[in-house]
Image (tube, grey):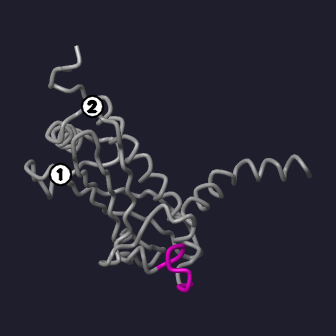
Amino acid sequence: MVKRLLGLLFVMLPVISSYAQIKGQDYKVDENGDVVISKIVEGLSLQKHEIYIAAHKYLENAYKDTKYKIVVNSPENGVVAGEGEYLQFYEDNFFPYSYFLNAPFVLRVDAKDGRARISIILSYYTGKRSNINETVDIHDRISEFQPINESQAEKRKLYNKGFPVLYQKVLKTLKEVEEALKSTVSSVPDTDW
């Protein structure tokens, strides 16, 4: 019995941990009702335009989780953003329905000399709800449902389970962009020699 309980705790620990991070407000809801998860990367040995170029290159070449369509391209402001989508990041069954969730998002990088802000903006869950007889499209604003909106009990089971999975995908993407920026070598010679 104790082994079974410890095994269950071991399996649930990543979910509990990610839910604790989510409850700890590692995201914000902006004035448009979009969920924004950001990371500031400091100490880059790159100038603003080099960070912009590295971020642009990442958006053009990234295919791990999504392919990006560039929607903001402002070299003079050091801002680049691309639209992507996490396809079928979560699947679940609540008899008699099966759910397949997607999440379109915008990945944005704001560059300054030596640092960058990487943001992922999430607006809606999309996807399908289906049973043997019908398939219905899902289009629900993420910020209107649990765990973000605690007062909303509708679809609680689905989104309370789906959001932590989506959150982990976002953290993985933020880390990939950070690593791409940190691995970029400056073209400006070091003048301290």
Say which residue appears at 35% left-offset and 41% top-offset.
Answer: 42
Crowd class of label 1 (few under 14; some 14 to 19; many from 20; radius 10 Å): many
For the point 47% across and 58% down, which residue is it? 167
In whole angstroms, how far apart are the C-alphas of marks 2 and 1?
19 Å
Q: Is residue 190 above or below residue 115?
A: above
Tell me if residue 100 comes above or below residue 140 in the rendering: above
Q: Nearer the viewer, residue 26 or 151?
A: 26
Residue at the farthest left position: 76
- Magenta extent: 145-153
Marks 2 and 1 in Cβ contact (< 8 Å): no
Which residue is label 2 attached to?
Answer: 45
The three-letter code of the residue at mark 2 reads: Ser
Task: Please name the residue that numbered disc 1 is placed on.
Answer: 80
Q: Of callouts 2 and 1, which one flags the residue occurring earlier in the amino acid sequence?
A: 2
Q: Residue pushed farthest top?
A: 193
Quadrant in the picture for residue 115: top left
Q: Amino acid at mark 1?
A: Val
Residue 149 colored magenta?
Answer: yes
Q: Position of residue 72 (x, y in %)?
A: 14, 57
